[in-house]
Image (cartoon, grey):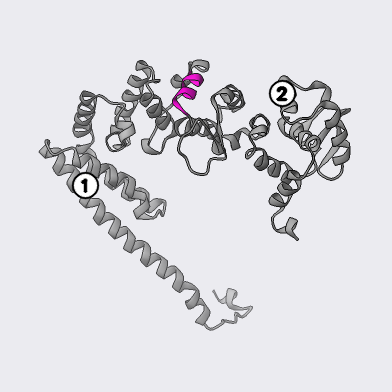
Amino acid sequence: MKFVETPEQFLRDVTQRLDEASRAALGMIFMRGGKLPSLRKLGPEEDHALSMLNANVGSVRKALKILDGTMVMQTRESGEYSWRFKHPTIRDAFSSLVADEPDFMIVYLAGTRVESLLTEVTCGSMRIKGVKLIVPAEQWPQVISRLNELDLTKSEQAEALQEFLANRCHRDFLRLYIEQHPRFTASLRYGSWMRYVSSVAVAARLHACRLLPAVERERFVKEARRLAVVTPDADFLDVPTIRALFRPAEIESILRDVFRKVAPKLRRIVSEMHEECIAEDADPDQHFWIFQRALRIYRSHAMSNRQALTRFSKAYSRINRVVEKLRKRREKMEKDLAAEPEAVAIEEPKVRSIFDDVDE
């Protein structure tokens, strides 16, 4: 019953009670990503892990035969035999176990899915709650080797890496990573809204650590200037870590661009967003709130420019009126839609004659 209710915890308890050779056997499969072709082809890291776990190739080979059919199984594929976990839950249970035991660290770093590493570990102490493992400096090269497995042409993996570097890595780890990936900062692409963009977060973190090259800081400022006008994105003014990337003169220059290029177009922008909200049947509060926040930020920085201040204030008030109008429209439509089934339900059934179509 316990296995049915909490299979991972049950298997974790079982694994903890295994002898050293059996746990090492599971560790070898884990380090190979769930598939161990042959014990004769172990690498240096796996040999090191065996010695730390008080096991050797002979004892692991015997343990695999004992575990065969219960926790592992031997399969044949393309004429080659390999050992696998009998069920994915066993791998998950083993992963949670090795993360808690220092002697298993090398096993954990080698065998855990790289996507899981990005959300479970920190490289150095980062004061983050819920961290499964704090990786010490001597193991950082192994972490970087695992990060290299990511396919950075896929946006979700690139963003996950950027978030990891921005939030879970000590300054010294970042320095080591940049040294080994000198083109990383040049590969960053920025967009809106800046406070939610992982590439912006990692650029801000690198700048705070004095690891962002001057040319890359200038490239970011140039892109932020464009976003400030085109989006318009005011997060560079409101988020301290992002604002730290700018020099005071750059801030003033961008604001002049915003006041000259954005403020005169606010009435048209609000009208276009109004039409988009209706066409997409979007929630008006969600549709406007980020843009409204940007207007509020720009308005607070326009005190010395009376014309721009007036335009931002009027646009902000107009959005409030538009949102209220759209909210009432949406509520009326929802009420009308809810009332339709009732009207159909009370309608008397009508029996058609076979001659009705002829008469029409």
Where residue 216 appears, x then y in whole percent? 38, 19
Give the prevailing secondary structure in the magenta stretch. helix
The image quarter containing residue 113 is top right
Residue ranking furthest to the bottom:
348
Q: Where's residue 101, x and y in %?
A: 65, 37
Q: Is residue 38 visible?
A: no
Q: Provide the residue designation for mark 2.
A: 48
Q: Is residue 201 left or right of residue 313?
A: right
Spot the residue most to the front: 54
Three-letter code, disc 2: His
Return the x and y of residue 5 as percentages of the image width and height: 70, 58
**Residue type pointed to by label 1:** Ala
Cα separation, mark 1 vs mark 2, equals: 66 Å
Residue 208 seen in the current view:
yes
**Bounds of the magenta span?**
170-178
Q: Which residue is mark 1?
A: 315
Q: Residue at x 49, y 24 (%)?
A: 173
Classify the position of the C terminus by image quarter. bottom right
Within the magenta stretch, is there residue 172?
yes
In the displayed structure image, the side of residue 169 where residue 39 appears, left or right: right
